[in-house]
Amino acid sequence: MYEKFKGIFPALLTPFHDDGSINFDALETLVERLISQGVKGFYVDGSTGEAFLLSTEERKALIKAVAAFTKGRVTLIAQIGSVCLGDAISLAQCARDAGYDAISSVPPFYYKFSFDEIKRYYYAIVEAVDLPMLIYNVPLYTGVSFSAEQISEFLRDDRFIGVKHTSSDFFALRQFRTAFPDKVMLNGYDEMLLAGLSLGANGAIGSTYNFMPEKFIRIYNCFNEGKLEEAARLQEEADKIIAALCRVGVMQSEKAILTKLGIPMGALRAPFIDITPEQKEKLFTEVLPLL
């Protein structure tokens, strides 16, 4: 039932021109490159895509553009979360109209909403739009860490198909999987993909998949084929690269690497600060030989 949601999904970066506008030509080039490398689909408008630094209209433009570029060739999931429920519903409607396979949402954040308020938020979205919902559990950024009991409040409803679990709490992931063996569990931390797969993830949504998806596709395939030593070796390779990115800024590094590989990504939106030319050269020296 959920096969289209199992596999490796890049959380798409958003390329920008020097004037700060979205570079749709570069985005199309990135999408085509990733499809040719074998990704299952795309997670659009998420944290990696700088969604919360974009206007609602820019987010809608991204959702529409990726659908136009992919033309039904891959699975599309739109992250439509917003502190403003009205904006979240409007973005979900945009995804529906563009032909997306599912929506996903962070819980409403900043105001420390109660669980009842968070539950009301999610149910208002799925009642407004006939698309399956993937709960986005990302406690580091939202301050909301869903318990197994709370996740059950959603996953008992067929409109909620699973969880994007961007957390190092693998005990929670295992509890989600045990309680709902048929739902979709997607790992969120790239450096922990193999751990997530071993505890029940069906695949993953990741940031570094923008420039090295083939390495993670191989990890995923090796795990499913029982080639655990090979999967562990590949995860170690990926983690060396991720460690280099973490030293200077993950998304800044990803954009720099893709630009070096021929896709002009531009800088991140302010207030992010770009990495220096010296940091870029050191990054390339460390990372490019490992790709």
Image (cartoon, helix red, strand yellow):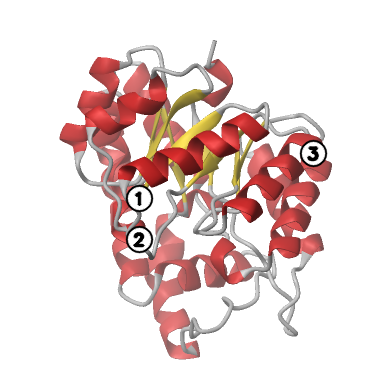
Label 3 amino acid? Ala
Q: Position of residue 73 (x, y in %)?
A: 75, 29
Depth check: 47 or 211 in front?
47
Q: Residues within 10 Å of mark 3 (few under 14, many from 20)?
A: some
| Residue at image mark 3 | 98
| Residue at image mark 2 | 141
Q: Is residue 23 left or right of residue 156?
A: right
Q: Position of residue 283 (x, y in %)?
A: 41, 74
Q: Are marks 1 and 2 in contact (CB under 8 Å)?
A: yes
Mark drawn on residue 203: none
Q: Is residue 126 left or right of residue 277?
A: right
Residue located at (39% from left, 17% from top): 156
Label 1 amino acid? Val
Q: Are marks 3 and 2 in contact (CB under 8 Å)?
A: no
Q: Can residue 283 be seen here?
A: yes
Residue located at (35% from left, 16% from top): 225
Residue located at (21% from left, 26% from top): 174
| Residue at image mark 1 | 138
Q: Residues within 10 Å of mark 1 (few under 14, many from 20)?
A: many
Q: CA distance from mark 1 to mark 3?
A: 26 Å
Identify the mark nearer the N-term, 1 or 3: 3
Q: CA distance from mark 3 to mark 2?
A: 28 Å
Question: Which image quadrant is residue 68 in?
Answer: top right
Q: CA distance from mark 1 to mark 2?
A: 6 Å
Depth check: 1 or 85 in front?
85
Looking at the image, residue 286 lies above or below residue 206 = below
